[in-house]
Each structure stands twice: as C-alpha cells, then as structure tokens.
Amino acid sequence: MNQKISSNSVQSLNPFSKKHFVIPALGFILALTVLLTDSNVTIFNTVREALSPLGEPFWSGITLLGDALVGPLFLIPFLKNRPGLIWDGTLAALIATAFTHIIKPIAHIARPPAVLDLAVMGPRFLQGSFPSGHTTTAFTVLGLLVMVGVIRGFGPILLAFILAGLVGVSRIVAGVHWPADVLMGIAGGWLSAIFAMYLAQRWPWGGQGWPMRVQIALLVLIALFDLLSHDTGYASGIVLQRLVALLGLVWLAWDAIEAYYLKVSTA
C-alpha cells in the first residue's frame, strides 16, 4: 500500500475512465430510487432503530471523520510517496465544497429533525439536508486514495470503503440526514475526486515548488486547529478528533525530518 508511485504512472492515470464512474453512478441511481419511491423516512427509521444501540460515542467518532477539516488529514500518510496528492486534495476540497454549498440551497430540503420528532446527536440542524457534506468529504478522500492507487488490494480498499460508508451511515444515525442525502454525497464526493485529478493534470504547477509548500503549511494549520480548538459539535468524539490531528502532525514532522537528513546526506 505504501509502494512508491512513479510520476509517469500518476500522469498516465485517466480520471475519466469508465470504471471511475461506477461509484457515482450507483450513488446517483440509488438516491433517485429512494426519492422516487418516497422511502426516505422508512429507511431512515430502520437504520436508526437497528444501529443506534452502538451508542453515541461510537457514532460521534465516526461522523467527525467526515468533517471538512478532519477528513483531509487522512491524506497525510500518503504524501511522502505521492507529493502531488496535496494538490489533488486541495482541488477536490474546493470542488466538493462548491458541490454541497450550491446544491443545498437549491434543493432546500428540510432535515429529519424539522420533519420528525426525534433526538439528534450533535448540532440540531433543520435545513440544508441534501446532500450530506460529511459523506461528500469522506468519499472525496476515498476516491482520491483509491483512484491514484495509494490504497491497493481488495482488503485495504474494502476496509476504506467500509469506513467511508460508516461516515455516511452515521449521518442517518445522528438524525441529521436522510438516506438520499448520503447517497448523493457518495456520488458527489467521488465525482469531486475525479474532476480534481483531471484539473491537477492540466495544472501541475500546484503540486510543485512553493504552491505545494503553502498547501502543506495549510494542512499543518488545519491539524493544529483540530487538535487545539476545532469544535465539530460532537463532544463524544473529541478524543478521536485530537488523536487523528496529533498523528497527522507527528507524521508530517517525521517526513520533514527524514527529507531534511536525506538532503543533507546526499549533499
């Protein structure tokens, strides 16, 4: 999984390969099916009833992994062997943010607490349900890691899909998103990764020199923010949030030290 990926193999990746559109197509078709059959409430209640017993600490920890300022930290372990991934991630974050913030006000769909009498985990949002931003973030990160090939093999890919899928499920269990929101988040997140890869190949300057250093510095600031003060609204998951941020900072520091001594030894 951590094998060095050559720049030639990265450049030869075709973001618009048909196989890359399987996941977003499935997400879109399933979301449309749920909407057309008016089964949002039924699936929502079934999922909540079946999975809520796992407890708020578990689901709060899972759901915060899809936070827009936590999810990008999962790119850090792969930056050493794939430095250009930082540029892919920056573009993907911009596209995913535009996707959710443009569609939410247009769709103008009320969230479950505005329709049903229920308790929620975390902040009690009432509007802007469609699509799920947390799910979009999770599948944007997953899409990048899988399509550029830094996560390889059936086992690792399956585990990554399960984790990203749980982020989506957690939004239903938390009581703040409908199933169709999550399914559209899957489609939108994966499409964000596809278009980010395409743009990164057209504008490679963003993954080199000072632009790359600026983005890494921004990633460090995000990790520090997550560690010291970022309030996701899910107090039960704060320990996991800080652990992810701390590990990200340590990983970045280790890679920087290793790169420095490698440079000195070859000078």
Image (tube, rainbow, N blue to C red):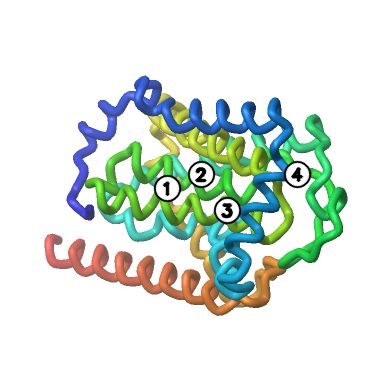
Q: In the structure shown, which secondary structural element does the residue marked by tag 3 occupy?
A: helix
Camera-side mark, 1 or 3: 3
Residue lying at 83% horizontally and 46% vertically, measured from the top left: 127
Q: Amino acid at mark 1?
A: Ile
Left or right: residue 259 versus residue 144 is: left
**Mark 2 and mark 1 residues within 8 Å of each other at the beta carbon:** yes
Q: Earlier in the sequence, mark 1 or mark 3?
A: 1
Q: Which residue is disc 2 drawn over?
A: 90
Q: In the structure shown, which secondary structural element does the residue marked by tag 2 occupy?
A: helix
Residue lying at 74% horizontally and 44% vertically, measured from the top left: 41
- Cα separation, mark 2 vs mark 3, equals 25 Å
Left or right: residue 252 versus residue 242 is: left
- Cα separation, mark 4 vs mark 2, equals 24 Å
- Cα separation, mark 4 vs mark 1, equals 29 Å
- Cα separation, mark 4 vs mark 3, equals 14 Å
Picture disc at residue 86: 1
Q: Earlier in the sequence, mark 4 or mark 2?
A: 2
Q: Quadrant of the C terminus?
A: bottom left
Camera-side mark, 4 or 3: 3
Q: Which residue is disc 4 drawn over?
A: 129
Q: Position of residue 212 (x, y in %)?
A: 43, 48
